[in-house]
Amino acid sequence: MLTKEQNERLTSVEGEAPMARLLREGYWLPFSRIEGLAAGAPPVRVRLLGGDYVAFRGEDGRIGFIDERCPHRGVSMALARLEGCALRCIFHGWLVDGSGKVVEVPTEGDRSATVAERVPFNHYPVAEHCGLVWVFLGEGDAPALPELPWAGLEGDSVWITRSVVPANWLQGLEAALDSAHVNFLHSAWPRNESEMDEQSRRFIAVPRFAVDDTEYGMRTAAIRESDDGVALVRISEFLTPFIAMTPAPLQYGERSGTFFIAVPVDDGNHLLFWGIFSQTGEIGSFFMRDQCKDQDNYANPSGSRDDNWGQDREAMARGHFSGFPDQLLLEDVVAQVSMGPVVDRSLDFLTHTDIAVQRCRQLILKLIERFEAGEAVDGSLPGVSTGLLPRGALIPGDADWRTIR
């Protein structure tokens, strides 16, 4: 259980809150799929850590990321005209290029270039990496980008979605680390979907858990035993502070996995990037992909608390466990949203199956403490490489899960 003060340190991500400063100064933050920013398309609003920005891809393919507020009078640059590789404010025609430099102030006539040189305006470095567009919001040198396991994969070897979730970022992260809920919240899917690995269906028991600390965060094992002396082990990796990787179904092979990245928008909202990858082949058709209507708005909840976010009680009566039969990830998102914008974790009653969630909270709190003490934070995630993979395997029930490689 956390105190109210500890909970606030973890969940407050705006302004000069410790968590906001840690993420802003120490880490690259993904905000879009690469395909989500089309060359020559209108600029898009981006909100991160409570700040408002605009991103755009110029006609030459370069990406600009600037403050949303026009430096002149504050009009939104999301309204701006895209001209080549620059944005022109619709209010007075000021032109800002992708590097954040004001290049034209037409209201000043012959003095345009002279005035433009003096206008301060924030812009931020961006990078296309691992199928995502990342931004560094800090003032110092940006760290190296982390070498995540799906780096360099192309085509159908990786598939990524983006969801906008009206709940605090930590709720999204903790859901990814909580393996125990799979047997309940998602129980309708293994029964109904032929794509689920046949061997895993007999492992229906609530798992026992083990956790080991790592250089980059922690490794968690969820161990489900069967009656025939075999155990299904699912080893997940937590990359502090906001990335979790879980094993893909066994059918995808050893060098595959799924990932969750929970990026704070503000205190009450986050971006959730979910994807699946294989280092040895193509992803192909599977039920979570077949359910997709929009990769950039994948599991956005509809409705409100008043109608239980569209929960289908008739589907429940027919046997669907959660009442959200349209999409598996939507079950997770609605569960998070139902908690409220920011959960008061001082009210939690935690048990053994919450060991990964508990350890995650402590790791992030320690990271904040070290950051506030002046210790350098390496946002490149030392120890992480393309060879670091979540694992799923069948082993003898009495074997040590740590022998899985």
Image (cartoon, rainbow, N blue to C red):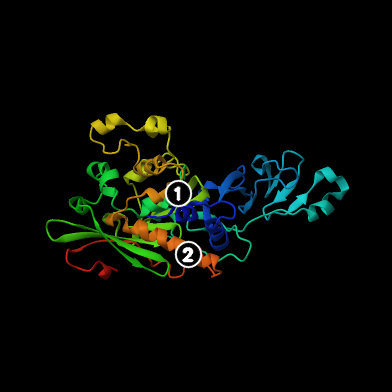
Question: Going 41% across and 30% down the picture, which residue do you hit?
Answer: 306
Vertical side of 84 occupied by 374: above or below? below
In the image, what residue type sits under mark 2? Leu
Residue underneath mark 1: 272
- Nearer the observer, 267 or 378: 267
Question: Going 68% across and 45% down the picture, which residue do you hit?
Answer: 69
Question: Going 38% across and 48% down the picture, which residue do you hit?
Answer: 347
* In the image, farthest residue toward the left: 228
Image location of residue 340, percent across then percent down: 43, 41
The 10 Å Cα crowd at callout 2, few under 14, some 14 to 19, many 20 or more, is some
- Nearer the observer, 315 or 178: 178
The mark closer to the camera, 1 or 2, is: 2
Image location of residue 41, percent across then percent down: 60, 43
- Kindly identify which numbered label has been placed on residue 367: 2
- Nearer the observer, 70 or 373: 373
Vertical side of 143 occupied by 112: above or below? above
* Secondary element at image label 1: strand
Question: Going 38% across and 58% down the picture, which residue do you hit?
Answer: 245
* Secondary element at image label 2: helix
In the image, what residue type sits under mark 1? Leu
Q: Quadrant of the C terminus?
A: bottom left
Image location of residue 91, percent across then percent down: 74, 38
